[in-house]
Image (cartoon, grey):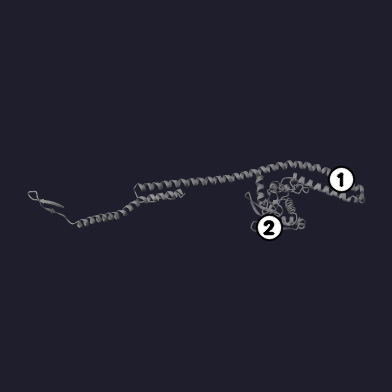
Amino acid sequence: GYLPLTDSYGTRVGMLYVGFLEAPYTAAKKEAYWTIVAVFLAVLALSAPLFLWLAKGIFSPLERMSLTMKRVERGDLTARNGSTGRQDEIGQVAGHLDSLLDQIQERDQRLRDWAGELNQRVDRRTVELRAANKKLEETFQQLVMSEKLASIGEITAGVAHEINNPVAVIQGNVDVIRMTLGPEEAQEVGTELDLIDNQVMRIGAIVSKLLQFARPSEFGTFEESLDLAPLVTDCLVLVDHVIARQAIQVEKRFDQETHPAPPVRIDPGELQQVVINLILNAAQAMEGDGTLTLSLQGADRDDRYGALLTVADSGCGIPEDHLAAVFNPFYTTKLGEGTGLGLSISQTLIQRAGGIISARNRKAGGAAFSIWLPAAEASQDAETTSAAQ
């Protein structure tokens, strides 16, 4: 700084100069600046870890809760926050969230248990309902069949009786013609008379089948305990001429080791009639060469043990819409050849023995008829129980 100097008369006689160097001031200024910067950096270096540690303690539980909620949204009800180690509001919120998730999981488990129990009950009721419907349908079919058989039985019995009378007259007149003409003259029309005899015999066979269908109880009920294997073998011998003529291969599958067929109680003649009828039907269905398979084994049916005999062929099979009608009276696929009573009579005979006969188509081609008969001991026990009641 500069200041003028004057005398007593006011005349300037000099000046006063006062000053100091700028360099020390600048140096002090820079030193103070850098000191402040260093202190700021030191404070920042010390406060940043502390701030991050404090922030981690706040945000880490929040992030854990967020992850837990995402897992719950994806369906994982076992997700939990766990212990946060905090007693503040955040720790209380995390603990309360875990408590709510525990309640949700418990209620979900109870709902699942109730749903599973409900499904089991529905399944049981469905199975029972199906079984009841099946039994009802079978009972209804049996009732309808019984009504049909009763009505047709009355008709066929009357028809058979009415046919027998003119047939007897025809046969008697043929005999009279033979006696009147004498042996020599009768020989000239012998072919015609023999033809009449054959047709009369055919009518008699048809009438016999009609009567057997109408009144099966009058055609023998001599039941006895027997093994099916020898009887089936005997039936093959009786139809050997048919099998040999058509070049049919016979396969016998008698499983007498793993599932042996027990003895059954039935009239041997009736069962032989049924088996022969099924074999002849199978041979006719194959129309030439083919494979006839006879299977015999033990099998359970309605909690009862018995013998299962299956007669299968490699023919054309049965139309699906005709499967339910094959046992109906007068049903036949051989128009002009059969009466359609063979399977119906077979069903009557098997049912009378307490058995079941059924038909199905094979996946490999052809049809299969199965005969199930209860074991002789079980059949006798059932008869004893029925008699006692």
Q: Nearer the viewer, residue 31 or 65?
A: 31
Query: Which corner quadrant holds the C terminus?
Result: top right
Q: Is residue 217 left or right of residue 180?
A: left
Q: Is residue 130 left or right of residue 232?
A: left
| Residue under label 1 | 172
Tell me which amino acid carries mark 1. Answer: Gly
Q: Position of residue 260 (x, y in %)?
A: 65, 56
Residue furthest left in the image = 8
Q: Is residue 143 left or right of residue 94?
A: right
Residue shown at 76% from the left, 41% from the top: 155
What is the quadrant of residue 242 in the picture?
A: bottom right
Circle 1 Cα neighbour tier, 10 Å, few/some/many (<14 / 14–19 / ≥20):
few
Circle 2 Cα neighbour tier, 10 Å, few/some/many (<14 / 14–19 / ≥20):
few
Tell me which amino acid carries mark 2. Answer: Arg
Label number found at residue 253: 2
| 3D distance between C-alphas at marks 2 and 1 | 50 Å
Residue shown at 44% from the left, 46% from the top: 104
Q: Nearer the viewer, residue 15 or 187?
A: 15
